[in-house]
Image (cartoon, rainbow, N blue to C red):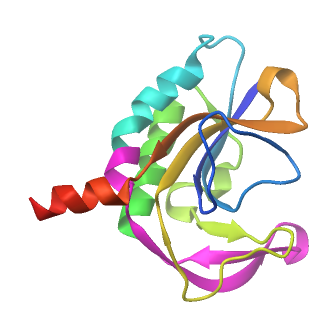
Amino acid sequence: MRNLIWVAFTEPVSPGMVFPRSDWPLHITLLRFDVGPDLSADVAGVLADLGEAPVKGALGTRLTVGEEAGFGHMGSIPVSLIEHNPLLQGLHEEIVEAAVGVGARIATPNYVLENYRPHISHHDGKRAKHGDVVVLDQVALVDMAPEGDHTIRRILRLWTHDAETNKDAESN
């Protein structure tokens, strides 16, 4: 199985970036899923192509950080919830549809679609605070075990929102 994840980073990242599994930049998980070896070798490329239009449509969306909560076993993982936003929810749903369409297995099927709870996990003393506004300006497809190495993560495709270009487009 190949483990992939769609995320919206809230800390700066770069295309092709590799980072340790224990040191993720802060992010909002959009969807974690697995694809089997029977699928095409370039399933990540196919998924990136399928996700490109919804991702580009959501880039620039302003999200508000809500209350803190505890996820995982007995609420042991501290997170900052993201307040409901229709564009973020729509992006999540379109990514789910694309993944299912290529035969992917959703890693957490009880937490998708109407049960999706976007959040930013606290990490190493870093966290988003209630009332903060984060901009959906970096969305990525990430390989959770590039070349079978489960100790690292690699950004396979990164879409970014260029605020300056967007300002120019809005003023015309």
Q: Is 128 on the left-hand or right-hand side of 144?
A: left
Quadrant for the C terminus, please.
bottom left
Quadrant assignment, res 9:
bottom right
**Total residue callouts:** 0
User: Residue 137 lies in magenta, yes or no?
Assistant: no
- State the residue at coordinates (35%, 46%): 56
Q: Is 33 on the left-hand or right-hand side of 60?
A: right
Q: Nearer the viewer, residue 57 or 100?
A: 57
Q: Nearer the viewer, residue 33 or 152?
A: 152
Quadrant assignment, res 149:
top right
Q: Give the percent coordinates (x, y) of residue 123.
A: 82, 68
- Vertical placement of residue 19 versus 105, above or below: below
Q: Give the percent coordinates (x, y) of residue 70.
A: 79, 78
User: In this orientation, does residue 136 appear?
Assistant: yes
User: In this orientation, does residue 102 appear?
Assistant: no
Q: Nearer the viewer, residue 159 or 99?
A: 159
Q: Is 135 on the left-hand or right-hand side of 75?
A: left
User: Which residue appears farthest toward the left when viewing the image?
Assistant: 172
- Vertical placement of residue 98 versus 87, above or below: above
- State the residue at coordinates (43%, 37%): 51
Quadrant for the N terminus, please.
top right
Q: Give the percent coordinates (x, y) of residue 146.
A: 78, 26
Magenta stretch in the rendered image: 55-84
- State the residue at coordinates (89%, 75%): 74
